[in-house]
Image (cartoon, rainbow, N blue to C red):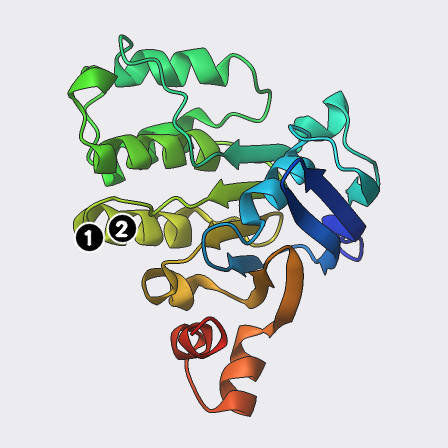
Amino acid sequence: MNAAEPVLVVHNLRKKYPKVEALKGISLSLPQGEIWGLLGPNGSGKSTLLKCVAGLVRPDGGEIAILGTPPSRASKAQIAFVPEVESLYRWMTVRQVLEFTSAFYDDWQKDSEEELLEFMRLDPRAKVSTLSKGMRARLRLVLALARRAPLILLDEPFSGIDPSSRDRIVEGIVRQFKGEEQTIIISTHAVGDTEQLFDAVVFLHEGSIILQGSAEELRASRGKSINDLFKEVFA
């Protein structure tokens, strides 16, 4: 991968549903090696944007390029997407989930899988049906971080889970982030739990970007944390 080439470019992206205009001309360019926060309240268009990038939803207009190419079967191999809605087979064990998923990806790293299992305190023999929501969230993160995908999309990974699992997931992202070759987008409205992760942030509201930039520069120029800025913007 060319270090100078953006991992993701989105230009004038639009998506309409029957009763709502979910995306109103979104434009972004994400460099290699950063963690971005996609921040906004429920219904702001965060999930739609990630699904368009992942190739799961067809936009009504605009352009998307992943490492210079539009969404396709080839580009999907460059993306690890963890949707908000669970898709785990509950009759499987943790180990079976990992073996099933790894069979689809050439970039799966067995050593990272084992390290993540231990760090996330997941018993490989446990059935998914016996896991708490927080433990299932940890497992889903393992499925993304065990790959060497250039672009990782995490849609509301902290939604409705216990504080200990939130802390473990945040630390897991920090430990496993391959900054020299990956970019991560984390969609969330739980800004207080994740602010420490972000190199840059995008504030999305009703399908439009209302603020974006370096997290450090925004803190310095506004004199407040990203979490406080989020509360101010969406008050």
54 is higher (above) or lower (below) than 102: below
Which residue is at a point 19% across and 47% down the rendered structure image? Answer: 162
Residue 211 visible in the current orientation:
yes
Badge 1 element: helix
Q: Are marks 2 and 1 in contact (CB under 8 Å)?
A: yes
Residue 100, horizontal then vertical, whole percent: 43, 11
| Image quadrant in which the N terminus is located | top right
Which residue is at a point 57% across and 67% down the rendered structure image? Answer: 200
**Residue sticking out furthest to the top:** 91
> Which residue is the site of mark 2?
166
Which residue is at a point 24% across and 18% down the rendered structure image? Answer: 128
Residue 2 visible in the current orientation:
no
Determine which quarter of the picture holds residue 75: top right
Classify residue 137 as left or right of residue 66. Answer: left
Residue type, numbered disc 2? Arg
Classify residue 234 as left or right of residue 92. Answer: right
Determine which quarter of the picture holds residue 28: bottom right
As drawn, the label of residue 51 is: none
Residue nearest the observer in this picture, 33 or 194: 194
> Which residue is the site of mark 1?
163
Residue nearest the observer in this picture, 22 or 77: 22
Residue nearest the observer in this picture, 167 or 150: 167
Residue 197, horizontal then vertical, whole percent: 43, 62
Determine which quarter of the picture holds residue 145: top left
Residue type, numbered disc 1? Pro
